Image (cartoon, helix red, strand yellow):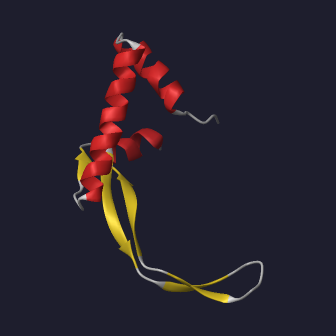
Amino acid sequence: MTNVNKDALVHAVCAKTDLSKKDVEATIEAMVDVVTDELRKGNKVTLTGFGTFRVSDRAAREGINPQTKAKITIPAMTVPKFTAGKSLKEAVK
């Protein structure tokens, strides 16, 4: 199993679409920027068949520092979540 980073993704998309590397990089950057901006606004981004990006509120909780075993309070925060769509789930099975 190999890790596909952004550069490998760009090359794979270039090979499938015959677009230039520069165009593919710009498109991927734009997609990431738009998804990030929409999540920052609290919106949900759905790519039908692929999946849904959304934000979720995580409540404050108590944790333990593994080095000192002291109890610490982990603050509440908003985190991004991704849920795979039906087509993606079926393709990975």
The residue sitting at 30% across, 59% down in the picture is: 54
Task: Give the percent coordinates (x, y) of residue 32.
Answer: 35, 40
Can you give x and y, in whole percent of width and height, for residue 50 in the image? 32, 42
- Percent of width and height locating residue 39: 29, 56
User: Residue at position x 34%, y 18% from top?
Assistant: 23
Considering depth in this image, is 87 or 19 the residue closer to the camera?
19
> Total of numbered circles in the picture?
0
- In the image: residue 52, left or right of residue 60: left
Q: Is residue 61 above or below residue 54?
A: below
Taking depth in this image into account, of 80 and 73 the one nearest to the observer is: 73
Relative to 30, 67 lies left or right: right
For residue 57, above or below residue 10: below
Residue 87's place in the image compared with 59, above or below, is above
At x 74% / y 86%, what residue is drawn?
Answer: 69
Which of the image's four quarters has the N terminus?
top right
On screen, residue 9 above or below 60: above
- Image coordinates of residue 81 in percent, x first then y, are 38, 59
Residue shown at the point (55%, 33%) measured from the top left: 4
Rendering quarter of residue 2 = top right
Q: For the view shown, which residue lies furthest in the right direction?
A: 67
Residue 46 or residue 38, whichever sits in front? 38
